[in-house]
Image: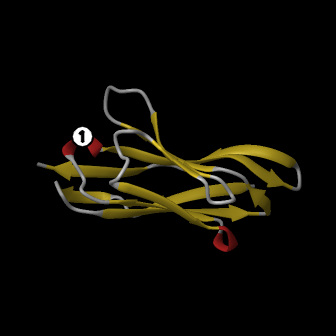
Amino acid sequence: QVQLVESGGGLVQAGGSLRLSCAASGSIFSINAMVWYRQAPGKQRELVAAITSGGSTNYADSVKGRFTVSRDNAKNTVYLQMNSLKPEDTAVYYCNAPDVRLIAGWRNVWGQGTQVTVSS
C-alpha cells in the first residue's frame, strides 16, 4: 500500500505565494518522476510541473518563471513553490507518481488533491 498526501493549499491574494508538499508513504523501493497536475472547475486536468528522480524538471508554459518544483528523495517528498500567483492559478492541485516501485511491482499513485484559491 502506498499513499501520496498533499498539503499546503489555501487562500491567497494575487501576487502571493504558497508552497505545496506531497509526501509518499508505504513500502516504497523507489519513485521515478513526480508530477503536479491541477484541475480548475469546468476544465481538464493539466500538467503543471514534473521532476525526475535525478532532478530534471519540466513546466507548463503558464507557470514558467513563477513555480519551482523540487524533491527530497530521502523523504519521498515533492514540493511546488508557487510565487506571483494569479487568479487563473485557482484549482485543485494533485500530486502524481506514475512509477512507484513496490515489493508487489510498479504502481501509478495519485494524491487526494489540495485546493488553491487565488483572489484578485
Instruction: Please give left or right for residue 100 compared with residue 67 in the image.
Output: right
Q: Which residue is drawn at 38% across and 55% down?
A: 67
Q: Where is residue 49 in the image (x, y as percent from the top left)?
A: 49, 47
Residue extending furthest toward the bottom: 74
**56 relative position to 63: left or right:** right
Q: Nearer the viewer, residue 3 or 46?
A: 46
Image coordinates for residue 86, horizontal then vertical, percent: 21, 48
Expressed as whole percent of the image width and height from the top left, the position of residue 52 reads 65, 53
> What colour scheme was applied to this rendering of the protein?
secondary structure
Horizontally, is 75 left or right of 87 in the view?
Answer: right
Residue pictured at 72% horizontal, 52% vertical: 32
Q: Position of residue 101 (x, y in %)?
A: 81, 53
Residue under label 1: 88
Quadrant where the N terminus is found in the figure: bottom right
Q: Who is closer to the viewer here, 43 or 32?
A: 32
Q: What element carries label 1?
A: helix
Q: In this view, does 52 lie above or below 70?
A: above
**Vertical order, 115 against 38 (above or below):** below
Q: How many labels does the image show?
A: 1
Q: In which quarter of the image is residue 53?
A: bottom right
Q: Residue 65, relative to residue 44: is it above or below?
A: below
Q: Residues within 10 Å of mark 1 (few under 14, many from 20)?
A: few
The structure residue drawn at horizontal position 29% and vertical position 44%, both measured from the top left corner, is 89
> Which amino acid type corresponds to the residue marked 1 in the rendered image?
Glu
